[in-house]
Image (spheres, helix red, strand yellow):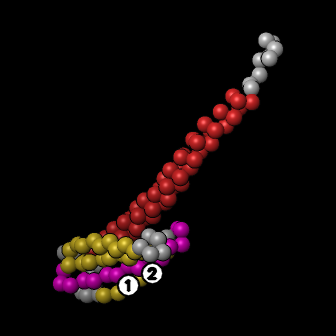
């Protein structure tokens, strides 16, 4: 090999390419999992905020008793089912939604009517 050669050899290029491919092999699944988790956390925050706002509206409502349900949609077009129950002065507001196709979640908040 000549002494004035200042470029990379084929072996250097293959070694660099193999290190880079190993990095992407392990990094891409982790990045994908982080993106999915961020989506689930964002969705859960939206659901909790919606549930809290609904409970606050019902605490100050004057009706004596109600048992109803409603369907709303998240910004990602997921269906949320809200059920409301009021017994005596206790209020129960629950929300159900699908996390994935096979996993469902229910969250309930409780409160007392304002006097």
Picture coordinates of residue 89, whole percent (x, y): 19, 80
Where is the C terminus found, in terms of image quarters?
bottom left
Towards the viewer: 34 or 53: 34
Any part of residue 91 in sight: yes
Label 2 CA crowd tier, 10 Å (few <14, some 14–19, many 20+) = few
Where is the N terminus found, in terms of image quarters?
top right
| Cα distance in 3D space between marks 2 and 1 | 7 Å
Residue that sits furthest to the top in the current view: 3
Kindly identify the residue that appears in the image at 26 percent across and 78 percent down: 92
- Queried whether the magenta region covers residue 76, the answer comes back as yes
Any part of residue 57 in sight: no
Check the image and report above or below for 84 versus 27.
below
Label 1 CA crowd tier, 10 Å (few <14, some 14–19, many 20+) = few
Picture coordinates of residue 41, whole percent (x, y): 43, 59
CB contact under 8 Å: marks 2 and 1: yes
Check the image and report above or below for 10 versus 35.
above
Kindly identify the residue that appears in the image at 28 percent across and 71 percent down: 109
Kindly identify the residue that appears in the image at 57 percent across and 47 percent down: 25
Q: Is residue 75 left or right of residue 56?
A: right
Start and end of the magenta stretch? 75-89
* Residue that carries the numbered disc 1 in the rendered image: 69
* Residue that carries the numbered disc 2 in the rendered image: 71
Q: Is residue 20 left or right of residue 87?
A: right
Query: Magenta: predominant secondary structure element?
Result: strand
**Mark 1, secondary structure of its residue:** strand
**Mark 2, secondary structure of its residue:** strand
């Amino acid at each position: 090999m000549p002494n004035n050669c200042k470029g990379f050899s084929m072996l250097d290029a293959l070694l660099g390419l193999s290190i880079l491919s190993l990095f992407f092999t392990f990094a891409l699944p982790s990045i994908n999992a982080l993106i999915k988790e961020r989506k689930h956390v964002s969705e859960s925050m939206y659901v909790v905020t919606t549930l809290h706002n609904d409970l606050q509206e019902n605490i100050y409502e004057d009706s004596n008793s109600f048992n109803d349900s409603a369907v709303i949609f998240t910004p990602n077009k997921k269906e949320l089912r809200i059920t409301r129950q009021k017994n005596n002065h206790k209020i129960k507001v629950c929300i159900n939604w699908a996390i994935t196709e096979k996993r469902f979640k229910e969250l309930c908040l409780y409160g007392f009517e304002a006097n």
